[in-house]
Image (spheres, grey):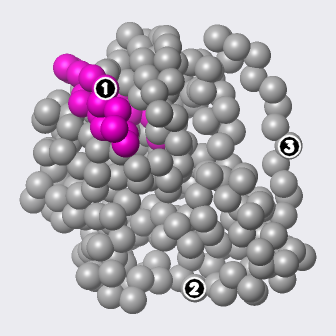
Amino acid sequence: MYPWVKRTLFIGPLIGPIHVAYGAATVVVSLGNSILIRSGTEVVDCHSLLIPAGHPVSMDAKREVIAICHLDVLREDFRRLHGSFASMVNGLGIGLLDEPDFKRAFLEMYLQPSDSNTVYQKLEALVNYGYRHRAVQPITLDARIVEAVNHIKSRVQENIPIKELASLVNLSTPRLMELFKLQTGVAIRKFRLWHRLYASMIPISGGASLTDAALSVGFSDSPHFSHTFSSIWGVKPSCIFGGGIGADIVVSEDLS
């Protein structure tokens, strides 16, 4: 598991079918056989897909090793990669046009683990593949939403009332909620929980228990942390970081 401020990457086996609604747009690539995906009434067998933020899906990786890359919350990565998939099914991008290159790069990261900064640079190159298949128009990020995101990140232990957050960025509460969802694809409350899960990985990487990590990033208790993790990731944190998969967390000093 590689957590960065902008993205998060997990590479490893996914045990059992999971039901997820990630807090950020996500690219999934199987390094082996195909993955079975269910979205609404649609069922697809594929090796790679792009999931929009907050989009509920079921995935059965059939115990294959897969790469799950959560992209940036402001969706710059999503816009880069959106045109890099062969088809769209119920809002999901299916089949990367450069799938062999992605599989090869992720397999190298899995078989030859490296430091966080090296992996980040390789991931950055993959994300930039989106420019190969269509002209990606530069986007204008709403400075007020960027500021709101930064407030949430800098005060991760606090449950900042949305009314206060709106006041900090000079917006009404309804307008902030509307613009935040439009810019990021998820509601403020979901993003706040999503970021806390990311932040919890830092103390876990330093040897903290799941309970201590949960409390350090503002969760009221361990059950709340576990429930939130399970509802977003589809598995309990003990499965990822404990005796299940037992993922190692690799962090960089600057957490780019």
203 up-or-down from 89: above or below: below
Mark nearer the viewer, 3 or 1: 1
N-terminal of the two: label 3 or label 1? 1
133 up-or-down from 106: above or below: above
Mark nearer the viewer, 1 or 2: 1
Residue at 81% x, 37% y is: 139
Separation (CA) of disc 3 from disc 1: 34 Å
**Pointer 3 local density, CA inside 10 Å: few below 14, some 14–19, many at least 20:** few
Separation (CA) of disc 2 from disc 3: 28 Å
Q: Which residue is under mark 3? A: 140
Q: Which residue is under mark 1? A: 44
Q: Which residues are magenta?
A: 26-45
**Pointer 1 local density, CA inside 10 Å: few below 14, some 14–19, many at least 20:** some
Q: Amino acid at mark 2?
A: Asn
Q: Is mark 3 in CB contact (under 8 Å) with mark 1?
A: no
Label 1, secondary structure: give it: strand
Q: Quadrant of residue 200?
A: bottom left
- Verify whether residue 114 appears in magenta: no
Name the spot of residue 215 as percent of width and height, x first: 38, 84
Q: Amino acid at mark 1?
A: Val
Q: Nearer the viewer, residue 93 or 237?
A: 93
Separation (CA) of disc 1 from disc 2: 39 Å
Residue at 13% x, 35% y is: 63
Q: Which residue is under mark 2? A: 159
N-terminal of the two: label 1 or label 2? 1
52 up-or-down from 229: above or below: above
Q: Nearer the viewer, residue 33 or 10?
A: 33
Q: Amino acid at mark 3?
A: Thr
Q: Is residue 109 visible?
A: no
Total number of numbered labels?
A: 3
Residue at 74% x, 64% y is: 178
- Classified by dominant secondary structure, the portion drawn in magenta counts as strand
